[in-house]
Image (tube, helix red, strand yellow):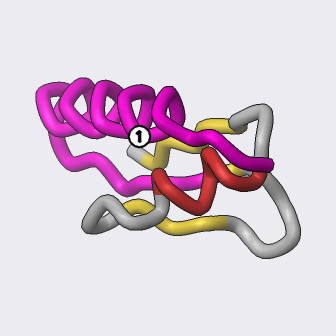
Amino acid sequence: MEVQIELFLSGQAELASNIPGVYLKSNSTTVSYQASHAYDFYRVMEAVATAANTARFF
C-alpha cells in the first residue's frame, strides 16, 4: 500500500523525507511511503508527524 501525506510547509516535508523509505514528491509538500503492513504504516505516520512537528522553517 502506498501512503501519501501532504504537509503544510515544505520544511516539514523535507524533514519527513529524511526518514528511511520516505520520499519527497517533486515540487510539493507531499511525501510518500510504500508500506507492506499496517504496523509499518502506523510507525511511519507517527515518525512523519513527529518530524513535521519539529519544523521551524518554511
Outermost residue, right direction? 27
Q: How many marks?
A: 1
Where 56 sits versus 31, above or below?
Answer: above
Outermost residue, front direction? 56
37, 27: nearer the viewer: 27
Where 29 sits versus 6, above or below?
Answer: below
Question: Residue at the spot x=49%, y=42% of the render?
Answer: 3
Left or right: 5 as drawn, with respect to 19:
right
Question: Residue at the spot x=59%, y=53% of the render?
Answer: 31
* Residue 10 in picture, x, y percent from top left: 76, 53
* Residue 17 in picture, x, y percent from top left: 47, 63
Left or right: 58 as drawn, with respect to 50:
right
Q: Quadrant of residue 49?
A: top left
Q: Secondary structure at mark 1?
A: helix
Q: Which residue is mark 1?
A: 51
Q: Label 1 sits on what residue type? A: Ala
> Residue 16 lies in magenta, yes or no?
no
* Residue 11 in picture, x, y percent from top left: 68, 53
First to last magenta residue range: 31-58
* Residue 57 in picture, x, y percent from top left: 71, 47
> Residue 57 lies in magenta, yes or no?
yes
Q: Quadrant of residue 26?
A: bottom right
2, 12: nearer the viewer: 12
Outermost residue, bottom direction? 26
Q: Quadrant of residue 45?
A: top left
Left or right: 2 as drawn, with respect to 50:
right
Question: Local crowd at mark 1 within 10 Å, few (<14), some, or many (≥20)?
Answer: some
Quarter in which the N terminus is drawn: top left
